[in-house]
Amino acid sequence: MNNNIVIVGGGIAGLCAAIAFQHLGIQVKVYERSPEPTVAGAGIIIAPNALQALEPYGIAAQIIRAGKASESFHLLSEKGEMLTKLTVPSGSQKMYSIHRKDLHHLLLSALHPGTVEWGKECRVIQQDDHGVRVHFADGSIAEGSILVAADGIHSGVRKQLLTKDIYRYAGYTCWRGVVSSDGLPGLSEHFIETWGTKGRFGIVPLPHHQVYWYALVNAPPNEARYANFTAQDLLPIFEDYHMPIPGLLKKTEPHQIIHRDIADIVPLKRFYEKRIVFIGDAAHAITPNVGQGACQAIEDARVLADCIEQYSDIHEAFVQYDIRRRKRAVKISNLSWMLGKIAQSESSILTAGRNWIMRHTPKSISQNRVQDLYKFHY
Ligand SMILES: Cc1cc2nc3c(=O)[nH]c(=O)nc-3n(C[C@H](O)[C@H](O)[C@H](O)COP(=O)(O)OP(=O)(O)OC[C@H]3O[C@@H](n4cnc5c(N)ncnc54)[C@H](O)[C@@H]3O)c2cc1C
């Protein structure tokens, strides 16, 4: 295959794919619409399956060095009682939390200088038997043998190829913040998520005395009054929740909070179209309820590179990528969607029943699921 790969989108998926291709000696360019290497966002958890996928590139070791480790994820009631604990399988890596900007920097540093071209917004794509052509908003054009669409949940490449809208609002909206953990009584070392009838609240310690929190509340899509909510506005919703939740909200300044509605896309029926292949959120944006969106994007990147190395025929490489990735991505997407519905219940009767079941479910059942989730599937 004449390998000259064009990647549209320089998020986690696009950068990891570029790292994997360069590792194989394949020529690759990433075209990112942001004018500079900045990334909006708070913290992120990188699970053991993603670390396994990143191992050959030395990135796993860097995340382990730069991140904050936890062996378990604790699910609590609003009073702070343990509902269940999900622990990484024995012998596996731990989970690592890291600030998104640090992860972005780390991925960029692993690429050859000049791999990413900034300020390149893809507008139109063309493909024929010989290759792909990408037209950018600034009038420039890039050509390659194949195009990797890594342009996220609102993928313009996907919209050009598929007319059907597959964006699905989940029914809840999310605020995230990162603040200093100094002087915050009641902060656990573990990653925790609290499920109550008014909403969900997650607390994830980060390195350098920082803590990442997120709050999820049921809401109609694009609710105007939530767009400018501050952490103080969230306080009445979460003031009765266990410590340090109210303390975290009181500590968060308006500029430290970001908001977005939670959605996914119905995973594509096929992750490729002739010379174009989809990875990450462009292929299967997943609600964040199992913390796997980016981890699955990382698995995509590794498997796609493996397939391209293994099969000289592009079509065969894409078919194999699809076979190896789609079933798992769809399964996790469905699991995450269902878990979100259960977690966001506002009924006190239903949540009492749910919490009882969670407390009494044998550990082996939830651990089996975790075992599968946290294992990289080649
Ligand atoms: C609240 C929340 C919490 C989450 N927590 C976790 C977690 O803990 N662990 C986890 O694994 N996942 C998590 N996720 C999911 C994770 O953030 C995403 O799955 C991941 O960021 C997807 O990466 P991506 O590169 O596919 O897409 P994106 O990050 O959206 O990147 C797409 C890139 O393409 C660029 N782009 C878009 N259009 C164009 C264009 N026309 N031309 C050029 N460039 C373009 C964008 O600017 C962007 O840089 C969470 C998601 C949310 C919403």
Image (cartoon, rainbow, N blue to C red):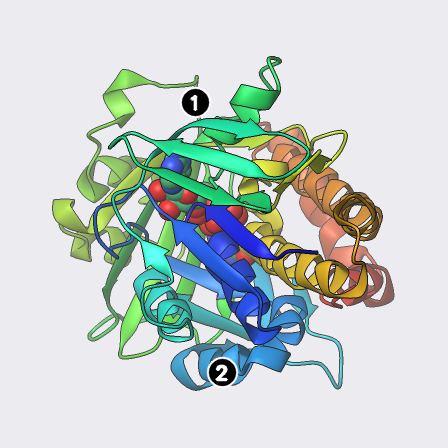
Using the image, determine if residue 164 lies above or below residue 57. Answer: above
Question: Which quadrant of the figure contains the C terminus?
Answer: bottom right
Total tally of numbered discs in the picture: 2
The mark that comes first in sequence, 1 or 2, is: 2
Residue under label 2, please give it.
64
Q: Is residue 186 left or right of residue 131?
A: left
Residue type at tag 1: Ala
Residue under label 1, please give it.
219
Q: Is mark 1 within 8 Å of ligand 1?
A: no
Residue type at tag 2: Ile
Q: Nearer the viewer, mark 1 or mark 2?
A: 2
Q: Is residue 48 left or right of residue 258?
A: right
Residue 243: tell me if it is visible: no
- Tell me which corner region of the image, top left, top right, bottom left or bottom right, holds residue 281: top right
Local packing at callout 1 (Cα closer than 10 Å; few below 14, some 14-19, many 20+) is some
Local packing at callout 2 (Cα closer than 10 Å; few below 14, some 14-19, many 20+) is some
